[in-house]
Image (cartoon, rainbow, N blue to C red):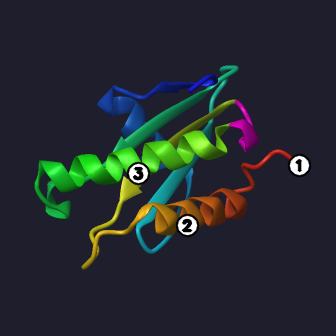
Amino acid sequence: MKNTVPLKNNNEFLKIYKKGRFQAGKNVVLYVMKNRLSLNRLGITVSKKFGKSVKRNRIKRLIKENYRYYEELIKVGYDIVFVARKNDCMPDYFDIKKEIKFLFKKLDLFIE
């Protein structure tokens, strides 16, 4: 990912949860906050309530791949955190893709 680095510190996540804007979807909640950098920072969290490590890693990979797909179209200078929501059935690639596109549009993150 060209213009994106990972978020790693817990206090950065907490700051984004507290001060950032958010939009909730069926499978994913998206938190966004402007940063003063010339790149985006990405964080993905999945609770242990979601399932065992196989399911948690699968949903993280799906979210990361869909973010990579839209990365060129996203404005630069934001901290972005995805939180996977527990659901009865495991969403597939296209469900996540459609939802992430919807959430990015709602939060006005696409370049015009």
The type of residue carrying mark 1 is: Glu
Residue sitting farthest toward the right: 112
Q: Residues within 10 Å of mark 2 (few under 14, many from 20)?
A: some
Q: CA distance from mark 3 to mark 1?
A: 25 Å
Mark 3 secondary-structure assignment: helix
* Screen quadrant of the N terminus: top right
Residue 49 located left or right of residue 65: left
Q: Which residue is mark 3?
A: 62
Mark 2 or mark 3: which comes first in sequence?
3
Q: Going 15% across and 62% down the picture, which residue do you hit?
A: 49
The secondary structure that dominates the magenta segment is loop
Q: CA distance from mark 2 to mark 3?
A: 12 Å
Q: Going 48% across and 44% down the picture, which residue do you hit?
A: 65
Q: In this rendering, is residue 39 above or below 28? A: above
Q: CA distance from mark 1 to mark 2?
A: 19 Å
Residue sitting farthest toward the bottom: 88
Check residue 102 for magenta coloring: no
Q: Do the residues bearing badges 3 and 1 touch, measured as CB atoms within 8 Å? A: no
The type of residue carrying mark 2 is: Glu
34 or 66: which is nearer to us?
66
The residue mark sitting in front, 3 or 1, is 3
63 or 76: which is nearer to us?
63
The type of residue carrying mark 3 is: Leu
Q: Which residue is mark 1?
A: 112
Residue 47: % across, % down: 22, 54
Where does the magenta region start and end?
Answer: 72-76
Q: Which residue is mark 2?
A: 99
